[in-house]
Amino acid sequence: LKGSLSALKPQVHEAINAMSLERDKIEHKTSIFNNGRFRDQLVEYHQARAKIEELEMAAEHRDENVNVLNGQLEQLTLELADVKKQIHDKGKSMTDAAPVIQMRAAIERLKEENREFDILIGVLYHEVTQARKGEGNYKQSEDEESDEDY
């Protein structure tokens, strides 16, 4: 195991040296990028990024406001629908002739019943009158019979 490790040591050192060179190249390019010709563009990028974050926060705030307003709009829409229904029902009942027709039919039934009672009263009056006349004749005939007895 030690023998294989010692054989790998030069390869590992070579890989470490290669990585160090690549790291140095990246650091050099980064320093050129940060301090060199791209410095202005980097500042603009950071400013633009900050502005985007600010706008995103404002958009989230506006979205929340829109959601609240949509809820209020939905509630008002429901209330408006209720009011429209009430107005429609009131208007319908004002123009609906069904109650008037029902009242007229009830009045006609009452008139018919009134006529029937008038006829019944007339018949009863006639019978009572005839009965009284009959009683009167009966009483007269009894009086005549009682006069004859004396």
Image (tube, rainbow, N blue to C red):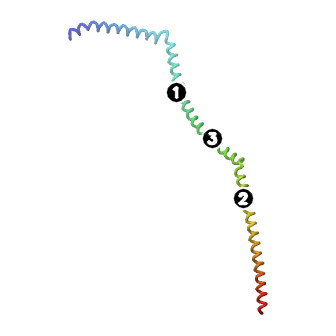
Expressed as whole percent of the image width and height from the top left, the position of residue 34 reads: 46, 12
Q: Which amino acid lies under the numbered mark 3 shown in the image of this protein?
A: Ala
Give the structural element (helix, strand or loop) at label 3. helix
The residue at the point 74 percent across, 71 percent down is: 124
Mark carried by residue 57: 1
Which x, y percent locates residue 127?
75, 73
**Which amino acid, by three-letter code, is at mark 2?**
Arg
Relative placement, left or right, of 58 versus 100 is left
Residue annotated with mark 3? 81
Q: Is 94 drawn above or below residue 150 in the view shown?
A: above
Which residue corresponds to the image point at 36% horizontal and 7% vertical from the top-left?
21
Q: In the image as oriented, which residue stretches furthest toward the left? A: 2
Side of 142 where 21 appears, left or right: left
**Which element is circle 2 on?**
helix
Badge 1 crowding class, 10 Å Cα cut-off, few under 14, some 14 to 19, many 20 or more, is few
Reading the chain from its start, which is encountered first: label 1 or label 2? 1
**Depth check, front residue: 92 or 84:** 92
Q: Farthest residue toward the bottom? A: 150
Which labelled disc corresponds to residue 109? Answer: 2
Dot 2 surroundings within 10 Å: few (below 14), some, or many (20 or more)?
few
Residue 80, by quadrant, is top right
Camera-nearest label, 3 or 1: 3
Q: Measuring from the top left, give residue 33's x and y in whole percent.
A: 46, 11
Nearest to the eye among marks 1 and 2: give it: 2
